[in-house]
Image (tube, grey):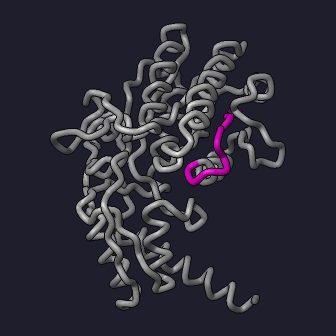
Amino acid sequence: MKIAVTGTGGLIGRSLARLLAAQGHSVVEIDISAVTPIDITDPVALSGALADCDGVIHLAAISRVAEAQKHPFTTWAVNVDGTRNVLSAVLASRLNPWLIHASSREVYGSQPAEPIGEDTPITPLNVYGRSKAACESLAQCAIDAGANISILRFANVYGDIDDHSSRVIPAFTRAAALGSTLRVDDAGTCMDFTHVSDVCDGIVRVVDLLSNGEKGIPPIHFATGEGTSLGTLAQLAVNASNGRCIVNEVERRASSVGCFIGNPQRAKQLLDWEHKTALISGFSAMVKGFAQQAKNHTVTS
């Protein structure tokens, strides 16, 4: 099967492209950093790349909340207008490919109770969340026009030391490996951390359903159902650094959601999916990865 993946330069896209290729699929990599760069904001190039694909997995986006707050119009152009281009190309394709659209737990905003299920009202708090909510609306319009689309919402995905350094777990595990100062944006902030390998496993399960003609799949989020405070995560870093880490707690940004814990039951019921990687294991592996990276850098310097 020929499957296009947008955003193959990102955390999920890199792992997913490798997994799909290992399963025998032909993967069309769409990313501005690919060997042949393709920008989702370029409708002509995008349409050509998707023309003969059986399915499309749309991951490309500006995905960091802080960056989106600083660059709202660029975020809207990439996330919303780019998604519109992807949907238009899918609808125009003679092969009528299925589409998996990557959304985010940020569409839920701040909610009064956890765990949060997929039918919780969408009330985004920040620019990134609003852009993803708009993308979901566009996806629904394409569904109404005949496209077969599955919307997947990701929680806090981690698991690769090559991820953006400002994201929570990469920042914490790097600080643990190097024994450096650790910035904590409100120790009480609570997140649901899901390993990238588990997320990719869930995506592939949806690919299998869509490839077998399944239609009308409701939105699904991949979450562990377990919340971890940043204070607890910081303590993991301190312990992993043998006490060398210095914790610097600051006030949480107004654009940041204070707590998200997702209910994983729908993913279990529809996909027989559940997370397999314990946070402590994934965290420890990244600390070791950063430590090895630092050691290799020292040797080659």
Count of residue discs? 0
The front one of 217 and 235 is: 235
Image check: 37 left or right of 209? right
Q: Position of residue 249 (x, y in %)?
A: 32, 70
Name the image quarter holding the N terminus: top right
Q: Is residue 114 above or below residue 118?
A: below
Is residue 144 in sight in this rendering?
A: yes
In the picture, the quarter occupied by the C terminus is bottom right
Q: Residue at x 35, y 34 (%)?
A: 124
* Residue that protrudes farthest toward the right in the picture: 36
Residue 128 versus residue 252 in the image, above or below = above
Q: Which residues are magenta?
A: 1-12
In the image, residue 190 lies at what x, y percent?
A: 27, 56
Viewer-side residue, 50 vs 297:
297
Residue 235 falls inside the magenta stretch: no
Task: Kindly indicate the quadrant of the structure image that contains residue 50.
Answer: top right
Q: Is residue 11 magenta?
A: yes
Q: Is residue 130 left or right of residue 269?
A: right
Q: Is residue 26 visible?
A: no
Is 246 drawn above or below residue 122 in the view shown?
A: below
Image height check: is 1 above or below 86? below
Q: Residue drawn 65% across and 17% down?
A: 88
Among all residues in the image, which is located at the extreme top? Answer: 145
Nearer the observer, 197 or 154: 154
